Each structure stands twice: as structure tokens, then as C-alpha cells.
């Protein structure tokens, strides 16, 4: 697979994790700081793994 295809799969997996966590843990809350913090934390974690293992280049 090419680099762009790997990036697309990585981004789609991040979206799937964010949506899954939202549905599992925050289904009853319409909007909250906890939900926002969890989503930002997931994105930061995915970003850290991306730059650690893919090197960003």
C-alpha cells in the first residue's frame, strides 16, 4: 500500500475509535467537557503514535 493509502486507513481508524468511544461512554450526554477531553485525548494519542512510528515523513 502507498503512503497516502496508509494515511487514509489510519485516519479512518482514528475516526472509528472516536465514534466508538462516544457511543459507548457518552451516549446519554448531549455535550460535555468530558466528551471533548476524551476526543481530544484520543486524537493526541493517535498523533503521538503516528509521529513515533511513522516518523512524520
Image (tube, rainbow, N blue to C red):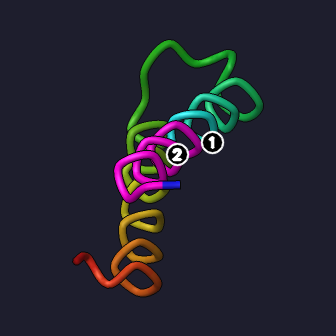
Q: Nearer the viewer, residue 44 or 29?
A: 44
How many residues crowd around disc 1 within 10 Å: few (fewer than 14), some, or many (20 or more)?
A: some
For numbered disc 2, what is the local secondary structure?
Answer: helix
Residue sitting at x 52%, y 45%: 14
Q: CA distance from mark 1 to mark 2?
A: 5 Å
Location of mark 2 (residue): 14
Residue sitting at x 53%, y 54%: 1
Look at the numbered discs 1 and 2 and tell me whether their residues touch, using CB distance below 8 Å.
yes
Location of mark 1 (residue): 17
Identify the magenta region: 2-13
Which x, y percent locates residue 34? 48, 43
Quadrant including the C terminus? bottom left
Q: Nearer the viewer, residue 2 or 22?
A: 2
Which x, y percent locates residue 3? 38, 59
Residue sitting at x 41%, y 87%: 52
Magenta includes 9? yes
Which x, y percent locates residue 26? 64, 28
Which x, y percent locates residue 32? 43, 29
Which quadrant of the structure image shows residue 27? top right
Magenta includes 21? no
Amino acid at each position: 500500500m502507498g503512503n497516502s493509502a496508509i494515511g487514509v486507513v489510519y485516519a479512518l481508524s482514528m475516526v472509528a475509535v472516536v465514534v466508538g468511544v462516544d457511543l459507548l461512554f457518552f451516549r446519554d450526554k448531549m455535550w460535555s467537557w468530558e466528551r471533548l477531553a476524551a476526543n481530544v485525548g484520543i486524537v493526541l494519542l493517535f498523533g503521538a503514535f503516528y509521529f513515533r512510528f511513522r516518523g512524520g515523513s
